[in-house]
Amino acid sequence: MSAIFGVYNLNRKPVASKILEEMSAVLSHRGMDDSGVWSDEPIGLGHRMFKTMPETNNAKLPFASKDKSLVITADARLDNRKELIGVLGPFDESDSPVSDSELILAAYQKWGESCAEHLLGDFAFGIWDSRNQQVFCARDHFGIKPFYYHLSENLFAFATEIKGLLVLPQISECVNEIRVAEHLANTLDYKEMTFYRDILRLLPGHCAVINRESKRISSYWKLELPPELKLKSDREYAEALRELFTEAVQCRLRSSVPVGTMLSGGMDSSSITCMARKLLAGDKTKQLHTFSGVFDHVKECDEREYINAVVRENGISPHFIVADNHGPYADIDEVLKIQDEPMTSSNVYVNWLSYKAAKAQGVKVILDGYDGDTTISHGLGYFTELGYEKRWVKLISENIAYARRTNQPWQRAAWSWIWNFGLNPWITKNRYASRVQSGVQRVKAMTASKTEAFFEGGAELNADFAQRVNPALLDKKKNIKLRTERDIHFWNLTDNGSHFSPLEILDYASGTFSVEMRYPFWDKRMIEFCLSLPPEQKIKKGWTRMIMRRAMDGILPPEIQWRPGKTDQTPGYNYGLKKFGRKIINDVIVKNPETIAEYVNIKSLREAHERFLRSEATLNDVLSIQHCVSLALWLQTKSKCSQ
C-alpha cells in the first residue's frame, strides 16, 4: 500500500524538486515509514514507503541498478518470488532478503518490456530507462494496485492517487462529463476514464512505454477462456481448488506486521478467515484479527450467528463494528478529503469503519473476500446453457432444487426459462405471431428479472446534458447473447469490468488508515482455474458454488459451508441512509440541487426521493439518490473549471 509517483518532462525541461516534494507530501498518508525522491534533469521519481513485509524492512525506493542506468519506484507484493530469484539471481541477501522492487527491476533488465508477463501478484511500478530515454510502467493483472496518469505532448506523470497528479500546474481539475454521465447511468463502459478530463487510469494488465518519439499504452496480458478442465471425480476438482486457495491465502499472509481479515459471515470471508487461522496456527507470535459489521437495530441484516460460528474457535481476536449506529455518510468530511472521485459503492462505510478499527488495533494488513462470487461463480449461467441446449428435464430439476434452497417459488422461474428458450423463439418464427403479440408482452413483463431492471436503471439525465455527451455513448442495452455458464463467467470477469472501480475506492479508504488490503479470490491462478471448471462443478442439486463448498470441507463450520445464500444488506443501508443521511440528502436534492442540476433531471430525482421517504423506493431509486448525492458532494469540493 505504498505510494509511487513520477514526472517525465518530454520537452526536456528539468523536473522541479518542489513538485516532487509536493507530490510526496500529498501522498504521505500512504507511507509514513520512509520516503524518497530521485531526479535527473527531465525525469523524477518518488515513493512513500509503507513497510508490511520482511523484505521491505531495509528497502529504499526509488532504487537504482548497479550501473545506475535503471531506476524504479514500485508498490508491489510478488507471489512468485522463489521462481524469480531462481531465474534472475543470484542476489546478495547477506544483509536482507531481496525486495520485490529489486526483483521487478532485475526482470526488466532480463526481459525488457515483456517483464510484467513474468510477474505474479499485485503491483504497480514505473522504471526510468536512461539508455533508451524512456519510462516503462505496468499495473497488475486485475488492478489491485492503483495507477493513474496524465499524458500530453510535453508531459507524462503518474501517481498512486489522483491527488498526486493534481499538484502539477499543467493538470487541470476539469470534469470529464462522459464519466459523470456513466456514473449517473450506473455503467462503466470507458474504463480508462476518470472524473478528470486530464487524468486516466492505466487499465489492469496494461503497460505504458513513454519516450519523446512515441507514447504506447498496451495490454501485456488479458484473461482468456481456458479449455474446460476434465478431472476424474468431484473430489479431484475440490482438492485442486483447495490447494490453489490455500496458496492464495498463504501468499497474502506474508507480513512483518499484524494481520486481520474482514469477516461478514458469508462463505468468502469465512473461508479466508478459517484458512488463515489454520495456516497461522503453528506461529504462536501471530494473532489473527477479524473485523465484522453487525446490526443491533436492523436484525434481518445481522450475521452474528455465522460470524460467531467462526470466531468461537481459538486463534482469532474478533472486533465488531455496529454498522447501524452509523450510515453511508459516516465521516463524510474525511471521506471527501481522501476520495478523489465520487463514491460509486454504497456500503463502503462499513469498510471505512472497519479500517478505522484496524488502525486502532495496530493491524496493518487485512485479507478481504471481496467479490469471490465473481471469481468462483454461482453457476447460475448453467440454466441458460441448459435452456439453449433444450435439456428441459435437467433444467427443470436444477431449477426446482435451486428454488427450494433459496426459498423461492420455482414455478415462475421455471416458466421464464421455458418461455425464453422454448416458446418465445417458436412464436417469433411463427407466421401467426402477431396475433399473440399482446400476450408475448405480458409474459415478458412477468418474466423480466430484477437484474435486467437494475441494469436498465440509473438516474434520469438532464436532457441538455444527455444530448451534449451523446446518448449513444451511454447505451447500456448491449445485445450480448451468452449461451454457456463459462461464457457468462468469463464476461463477468472481463467485459463487465465492474470489479476494479470498487477496489480503487476501497484502496483509497484503507490507505487513509494505513491499512493494506489483500484479496485472495483475485489471485490469477485461482481465477484461471475457476474459469476452466465444468458448470456441474459450480451448481449441483440447487447448491451454487458447489466446488467451493466441497473444497472447504473440514475448514468451514458446516452451518456456513452449507448456507444456501447470504443476507440482503439493503435494509441496513436504507436504515442508515434515512436515520443518518436525511439532512445531507435533503440539502442536495431539495434545498440546493443547483450543484447537479446541469447533469440530472431534478424533478425525476425529487420524485425518487419522495418515494424513498415514503418507504416505496425501488432499488433504482436508491441507487439514483446515492449516485446523485455522491456526485454533488464531490462537485462541491471542486473549483469550477473554465471550459
Image (cartoon, rainbow, N blue to C red):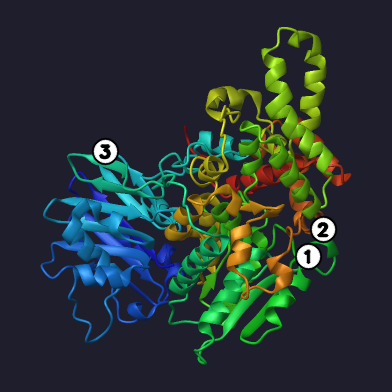
Q: As shown in the figure, which amino acid type bears the numbered disc 2?
A: Lys
Image x and y of residue 308, in percent: 74, 77
Q: As shown in the figure, which amino acid type bears the numbered disc 3?
A: Glu
Q: Determine the CA span between mark 2 and mark 1.
A: 9 Å
Determine contact: label 2, label 1, CB under 8 Å: yes
Return the residue at label 3.
153
Q: Is residue 122 above or below residue 185?
A: below
Image x and y of residue 478, in percent: 57, 28
Image x and y of residue 414, in percent: 77, 37
Q: For numbered disc 1, what is the local secondary structure?
A: helix
User: Does the rendering let one see residue 282?
Assistant: yes
Crowd around label 2: few <14 · some 14–19 · many ≥20 (10 Å): few
Return the residue at label 1.
324
User: First in sequence: mark 2 or mark 3?
Assistant: 3
State which quadrant residue 81 falls in. bottom left
Q: In this view, does 547 lie above or below 79?
A: above
Return the residue at label 2.
579
Determine contact: label 2, label 3, CB under 8 Å: no
* Left or right relative to 338: residue 615: right
User: First in sequence: mark 2 or mark 1?
Assistant: 1
In the depicted view, which residue is nearer to us: 10 or 484? 484
Q: For numbered disc 2, what is the local secondary structure?
A: helix
Image x and y of residue 301, in percent: 79, 62
Q: Say which residue appears at 73% left-offset and 76% top-offset.
A: 309
In the depicted view, which residue is nearer to us: 616 or 590? 616
User: Does the rendering let one see residue 61?
Assistant: no
Q: As shown in the figure, which amino acid type bears the numbered disc 1?
A: Asp
* Left or right relative to 502: residue 642: left
In the depicted view, which residue is nearer to us: 589 or 307? 307
